[in-house]
Amino acid sequence: MQVKEKLAEGPGKMFPPLCWLFLMRSLIALQGAAAQEVPSHIEFSFGKFRNVSLPKNVTVEAVVSKIPADITYIVFQFHTQHQNATLSYDRIPTVSSSQTGFDVGLLSPLRLLQRSLQWYLLSPEGSPVAGTAVILPYRQSDPVPGGCNLEFNLSIDASIYLHYNLFETIIRFAPANIGYARGSSPPLCDVNMGQNSRWRLQYDVYQYFLPENNLSEELLITHIQKVANVQEMTANGRRLVTLTSNDKTMVSFSSIPGQGVIYSVIVRDPLLNTSASYVPVHTYGCSFTSMLDNCYTLGKVSTKVLFTMLGIAGLLICFFGHRFFKSELFCVGFAFVAFLFFILITRTSSLDYDCNFQIFRSDAVFWVTFSSIVMLFPLIFLRWPREGNITACAIVGGYAVVLAVNSYIYTSLSYIVLDILKRALNNDFSRAFTDVPFQAIDFIMITVWVVLAVSGMVLQLYRERSRPFFPPSPYVMWKQERERRKTNILDPSYHVPSLWSRLKSRLRDAFQRREPAGERTPLLL
């Protein structure tokens, strides 16, 4: 009985309250650790985007179930703005089973009776990551993006690989394969080149510009959702080029730092009239994480100061260029020579900066055409030299103001000059597509440019209507002055020796010893 009574008293009297508190905290900690080992679970539906947050040191499992029997393969996409995310077939990612980047995607072929599928998402850098994800299904008649991959790590790689520098942005992707039934072996890629093989496939390259001067993550996510699949991209994007299976799966574009751009490739099967989309990629032509010159601080102070001074000079030339003709020649000549020397120095040294017709891919055709256009306008105004000079002052001066504004607010009009400069500096830039966005700010700047140019022309033509066409030539003025000095003996300058005589006298005095002239004062008697 004594033993039973002790037991009936319960454990509260056997352990002190502090021991119970310590035990409870230990159990809670163990439960939390066990919960972190279990991956989070997110259920997806076909074609519906979901915003996903990846916690620190947690693997998130993405699952799709109740897959219809007519679905042959599925593509999973995950997009972030500038943070790396890892998407893997397995819970523990490997090089051959995962993708890491801003725009990652995996293509999963389905087995014969498979009804569900899962992927794993995690942050490779140990920090929280937020993005948007979508699952897209395809049938056996649809081509398989990246199905004939021989270059990248995955056996089937539907991703687009993007690389950019100051001059160009390059995208690469793996060739696709023709569709096949669920559970069957994929067709061989390079056995034959007939119409029953992958060689009949075509690739449409699309470009989609984000709104200018907006680097927000919400904006990117919204627009990624507009172009993730075939139907949305063909409706909203711009097709730039169509590649055949004989072409190299690489396309180059002009880099536009600070401007968001989304690129996508849609592979088409013209025989079956079907298509599929690779995983779209985006770029801003700049880095969000670099300490200097990142996407938020693209404009250097020195660049802003330089272009502000250029804008002020442009205003003066636009309205008063012909009146101060010598100043105009100095400014325009300085800009032209600086442009040429910048190209020369950049191409011949290690210094760095701290139209899409097929015919213009040839450098010879491009530069001959460019030179002809440059020479055309002087020939047109050869009959009216004063009007031609005033027109040139107004147009060039107004454009200088546009460049000054561009150093503070992005505008596509700056690429009128920048693309020509890139073409001169980079040998490979001839292959790049030079499309730029044309949005509200560009319409405003064109209006400003036109108003400045017209105002400058009208003002200068009115001011110069009763003046001589051009100021006299300095050489003519020098000759007139020389003749005047010869004939006007009362002019004090008449008795001044010529410049050549003065130079000869100085040289002679420098190399000959002057003899003493003797006594110069009168003798005293």
Image: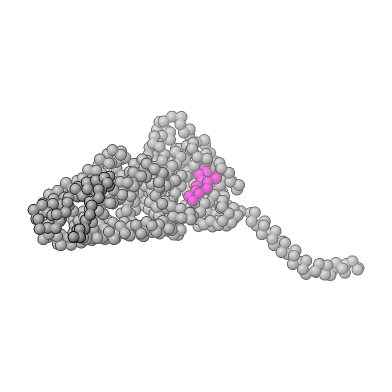
Residue at the far top in the pictured view: 192
Q: Name the residue located 56 percent from the left edge and 45 percent from the top edge.
A: 89
Question: Residue 396, percent across and down?
Answer: 25, 54
Q: Nearer the viewer, residue 180 or 84?
A: 84
Q: Is residue 200 left or right of residue 32?
A: left
Judge whether residue 209 is colored magenta: no
Task: Tell me which corner region of the image, top left, top right, bottom left or bottom right, holds residue 314.
Answer: bottom left
Please indicate whether residue 351 sits to the left or right of residue 461 in the image: right
Looking at the image, the residue that sits furthest to the right is: 1
Instruction: Indicate the position of residue 327 as horizontal and vertical percent values.
Output: 23, 56
Q: Is residue 473 visible?
A: no
Q: In the displayed orientation, state which residue is furthest to the left.
A: 487
Boundaries of the magenta span: 97-109
Residue 202 vertical position relative to residue 29 in the rendered view, above or below: above
Q: Look at the magenta stretch and give its main secondary structure.
A: strand
Quarter the C terminus occupies: bottom left
Q: Residue at x 39, y 59 (%)?
A: 301
Q: Nearer the viewer, residue 206 or 380?
A: 380
- Depth check, front residue: 110 or 133: 133
In the image, what residue occupies the spot 72% across and 61% down?
A: 27
Residue 6 in view in this figure? yes
Q: Position of residue 291 (x, y in %)?
A: 48, 55
Q: Residue at x 33, y 43 (%)?
A: 344
Seen in the picture, residue 119 relative to 301 is either above or below; the reply is: above
